[in-house]
Amino acid sequence: MPLLSSAAIWFDEVARHGSIRRAAERLNASPSAVNRQILLLEAEYGVPLFERLPRGVRLTAAGEVLINDVRRWRHDDDRTRGQLDDLRGLRRGHVSIGLMECLSATFMPQVFADLHRQHPRLTFGAFVGGTDRIVEDLQAGTLDMGICFNLPHSPNVQIVHEVAVPMGVVVPVGHPLAGLPSVRLSDCIPYPIILPDRALTLRSMIDAALVRLNHRPIPPITTNSIALIKGAVRRGEGLGFLTSLDVLDEPADGGLIHVPLAENRLSTEHLSVCVRELHSPPAATLLLADAVQTALAGALMSTHRPTALS
């Protein structure tokens, strides 16, 4: 007998599709049977879970509260089933991971491909976003693992590996700063600066450093997109501040040069591989974390000798 009731699963499907009829088609059940389960749930909790509309249904405030729990239960049920499959030797599992944009183009696809060759039954879900959102989703249980910069102390989040990643100025080939072994922030002041927006943790560090230099630039572009920053730099709109991982996917003749920053406060960012703090993390999550750690060491070795922090 499954620990998660069919009523909870059917409730989730109706919420996802916004329609009892479409949920019934998905569940291979009759609309009346699905509606009966919803009515029984509403009677059980004593509140309406859906607002009935002329075309479909919409969650009420009470329904929103319940759906968050149901989806967490389903996620935990999937994790438990994956662990039991591991015990049976099936090597099956699913890992939901949050990661930074700089790792999304080639780094993580390569990690996923390598693991699939070894463990074809493993599946992955990837969310690309900022540190704050990744931490929130880890704490809420909607992510199993995260890779993010400058992780704050966060309850229920455990760091399994951390490396120092070099910060630098990204400029186009031929730029006056391109041939230098390193640059100070003061060297950048004469040029337009394309700034990350405040969704990226790097922004607050740059702002503080510029204030110390009594410089308040008016950036031609502000964005949360690493790809947009690189594109604008490539077109000569200004220089950008990025890590060596942000230009990992750039070909040698890609038109961008990464020059390390000399300032101690800006010279590195800390990249953390973290998981939901559990007594025993799922085997698939630990397998992915180990694969990411190994791949990061290889990627960073091409540009510097990484400093292992844990």
Image (tube, grey):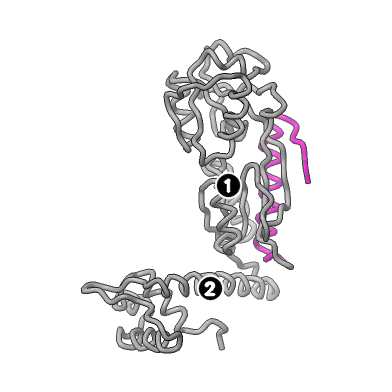
Identify the amino acid type marked 1. Thr
Q: Nearer the viewer, residue 210 or 94?
A: 210
Q: Is residue 74 left or right of residue 288?
A: left
Identify the amino acid type marked 2. Arg
Q: Nearer the viewer, residue 276 or 109?
A: 276
Which residue is at 65% across, 18% downward?
184
Magenta residues, start to end: 281-310
The location of residue 299, given as percent across then percent down, is: 66, 37
The location of residue 61, given as percent across then percent down, is: 40, 71
Q: Quadrant of the N terminus?
A: bottom right
Contact between marks 2 and 1 (CB within 8 A): the answer is: no
Q: Quadrant of residue 138?
A: bottom right
Q: Is residue 47 left or right of residue 30?
A: right
Q: Is residue 193 magenta?
A: no
The location of residue 89, given as percent across then percent down, is: 69, 72
| Residue 131 - label | 1
Q: Secondary structure at mark 1?
A: helix
Picture layout, residue 62 above or below residue 182: below
Which residue is at 51% across, 15% downward?
191
Q: Is residue 287 left or right of residue 241?
A: right
Which residue is at 63% across, 73% downward?
80
| Residue 74 - label | 2
Most prominent secondary structure in the magenta stretch? helix
Which residue is at 51% across, 38% downward?
198
